[in-house]
Amino acid sequence: MTVSTPGIHHVTCIAGDPQRTINFWVETLGLRLVKRSVNQDDPGTYHFFFADAEGTPGTSMTVFPWEGMRQGKVGSGQVARTAFRVPTDSLDYWEDRFEEYGVEYQDRVERFGETVLPFSDPDGLPVELVEVDLSADEPTVPWTEFVPKQHAIRGFHSVTLWLTHPDRTADLLREMGLEKLGTEEAADGDRVRFAASGPVGKYVDVLPTTQNGRQGHGIVHHVAFQTPTEEDQAAMRSVFQSAGLRPTQQINRHWFRSVYCREFGGVLFELATSEPGYTSDEPRSELGERLVLPSEFEARREEIEDQLVEITVPRAGSAQAEE
Ligand code: ZN
């Protein structure tokens, strides 16, 4: 059986201060807080989900604000870069916005014929914006509270994996149904690009590195790939097993069902179903407005809420961002 994936489902990273995290992803980057919840393995800490207006698969950056953790270091065995798509002719807008909000950004680079603007979140997480031509059947729905539609982030573009020995991971990506697109020499090494069926979260780039990494603030925790149905997920899980990896059993993550598997290079992969989705427990108009707890934690709501620091979600008021 041949397997395939449309691409990235979500990326999860580690941050520090919860309020600073919300301010950055919601106001500065213009994403929608589609879910405020707690870490299902550590319910005394938040888990935030920032996405497009609908929480479309392939658009959500999820963040664990773990204040007590140390600063991380990007290196081997990690998603070292996370890139988002923005419409063509948006990067001038974003550079102006980064100046206005004091965001650290670097010079634009060209990669596989596309223009990339690298920047960092407040915890030092390396993020990129990539200009793409949106097609007429673009599946993402931009959230325009702070950033106008013509410049709004439209889900993930890619992740870049840093690996000491990229070859086995490259083989695995092909076994997962991604197609090798090509290799591009760059100052940071030979970048090999793999493409899923897309269009959102379509690419995985692999770069060799000898640099050791360390988990902590500003580091990606894992990347999840879309396995829309249970059957897709079971088939992809079998690919991991056949490759000699040890995927977990399916775990109910409330908004999707997940299988986790650490790949050969040390990056934690997840396979996430499309269902039930972020609108399964809140109406679309109210996504992210209150703390949502998976049912097994509901009986402890008061105790859990007492442990969490208060947060305020930035609001633009009644006015939408100017077109
Ligand atoms: Zn995940």
Image: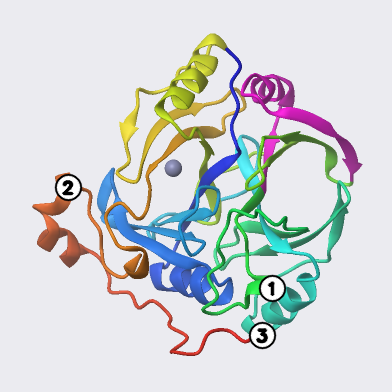
Say which amino acid is labelled 2.
Ser
Which residue in the protein does label 3 denote?
100
Question: Residue 131 at what x, y percent from top left?
Answer: 77, 60
The residue lying at 54 percent from left, 16 percent from top is 239
Q: Is residue 120 left or right of residue 115?
A: left
Display colour scheme: rainbow
Question: Residue 107 at what x, y percent from top left?
Answer: 83, 66
Magenta residues? 158-186
N-term-proximal mark, 1 vs 2 = 1
- Nearer the observer: mark 1 or 2; the answer is 1
In the image as oriented, which residue stretches furthest toward the front?
Answer: 136
Q: Is residue 317 left or right of residue 255?
A: right
Which residue in the protein does label 1 denote?
150
Q: Is mark 2 within 8 Å of ligand 1?
A: no
Question: Residue 176 at what x, y percent from top left?
Answer: 61, 23
Q: CA distance from mark 1 to mark 2?
A: 39 Å
The residue lying at 42 percent from left, 66 percent from top is 33
Q: CA distance from mark 3 to mark 2?
A: 41 Å
Say which amino acid is labelled 3.
Glu
- Quarter of the image where one finds residue 202: top right
Assess whether residue 166 is covered by the magenta stretch: yes
